[in-house]
Image: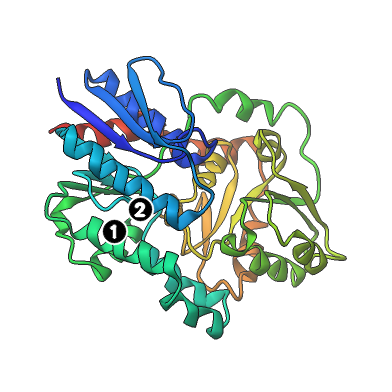
Amino acid sequence: MKTVVFLKSRLAHPGGLEKYTRKLAEAFAKKGCCVKILTTGECTSWDEIEVVSLAPTSKLSLYHLRHFDTLCQTWLAQNPKEIIFGMERNTFQTHYRAGSGVHAAYLKQRMLTDSWLKRLTFKINPLHRYLLANEKKAFENPELKSLFTNSHMVEQEILQTYSTPIEKIHVVHNGVEWIEKEKPFQESFSQPRSEPFHFLFVGSGFKRKGLTFLIKGLADLKHPYQLTVVGKDKNLPFYQKLAKGLPIQFVGEQKDVTPFYQAADALVIPSVYDPFSNVTLEALAMGLFVVSSKYNGGSEVLNGDTGVIIKDLLHPQKALEHALNFPKTLERATLIRQSIKELDFSNQLDKIVSLSLC
């Protein structure tokens, strides 16, 4: 029986990466592996998986990252295992899923949103310096056996930035609970569709998610539309002011986004940088047409019938106007949903497990 140790701090945090870690750990356990997770903060174990909390969770990002990494290396030195599976930026692991992408590439993309003066501080910012150093150690470590990316975009960023052998890299797109979304998908057609065309934006941290570009692009549309913004941001008043006079509704962060997918015609993902935005697949599984920036790795699963790519974030109008030709109908939505059937979570998790155990 092989032992797999996952490295993931803040496991109790209700986020996408935490959810993915749990699902992947369960997938290894189902294959007969002994699975442990090293984490921080209070977190209980669950069936067949032991959770080991090494330290309290710290709100200081730099200290938290350094402390967790040091504790992981100490624990692993005392408890050597066959497969050490990193889920975030630790310096050492035998297997690593780079779900957060490449920090060096992210900083480069911030030229789209940050002033030149702000960008100058990146070189001296201790957190950025630490992340870049850790990233280099992780990607170039000779003991790294497999590096999983969730998009070809991230794969290319790694190859262009670091000396990582291409044969170590495996691209496995994110998965979605495709089967579970069948019922809410059908329910979205239980009542007549409303007018006008309904755009949807889902994501917190509006700056990185590109909401400014979307609002400015919609301001120039001549066709009737409405936009619902789901998510939170500390600078919400700025975006509300930018959207003043436009048919845009801010509804805040939501525990369940399903009703908003059901009501919308198209999802817009104008990301400045997203290794693979999970909402891409969630929207497609709910039959929505997707408008995505080329800086979202999730755009790789789109085709001409299921979405359109914004090639220039400063001028998204053309892509938005194109989306207006794809209002949600049962026939069109069914085709969109079927296009990602093979990306069901179970299929994608099995790919990673199989590649890791071979």
Please state if 261 lies on the left or on the right of 43 as rendered.
Answer: right
Q: Position of residue 127 (x, y in %)?
A: 44, 64
Residue in the image at 51% along x and 50% along y:
305
Q: Which mark is residue 166?
A: none
Q: Is residue 174 left or right of residue 247?
A: left
Could you say where residue 126 lies in the image, as x and y percent from the top left? Answer: 43, 68
Q: Nearer the viewer, residue 199 or 26?
A: 26
Q: Identify the residue shown where x is 69% and y is 70%.
A: 217
Q: Residue at x 38, y 40 (%)?
A: 8
Query: Amino acid under label 2?
Result: Ser
Tell me if residue 351 can be seen: no
Which image quarter: residue 40? top left
Q: Amino acid at mark 1?
A: Glu
For disc 1, the marked residue is: 155
* Residue 93 visible in the snapshot: yes
* Residue 57, image x, y percentages: 48, 41
Side of 297 where 323 appears, left or right: right
Mark 1 vs mark 2, CA separation in Å: 7 Å
The quarter in which the N terminus is drawn is top left
In this view, 251 is above or below 152 = above
The residue under label 2 is 151
- Contact between labelled residues 2 and 1, with CB atoms less than 8 Å apart: yes
- Residue 111 horizontal/vertical position (percent): 51, 77
Out of 194 and 31, give the one closest to the viewer. Answer: 31
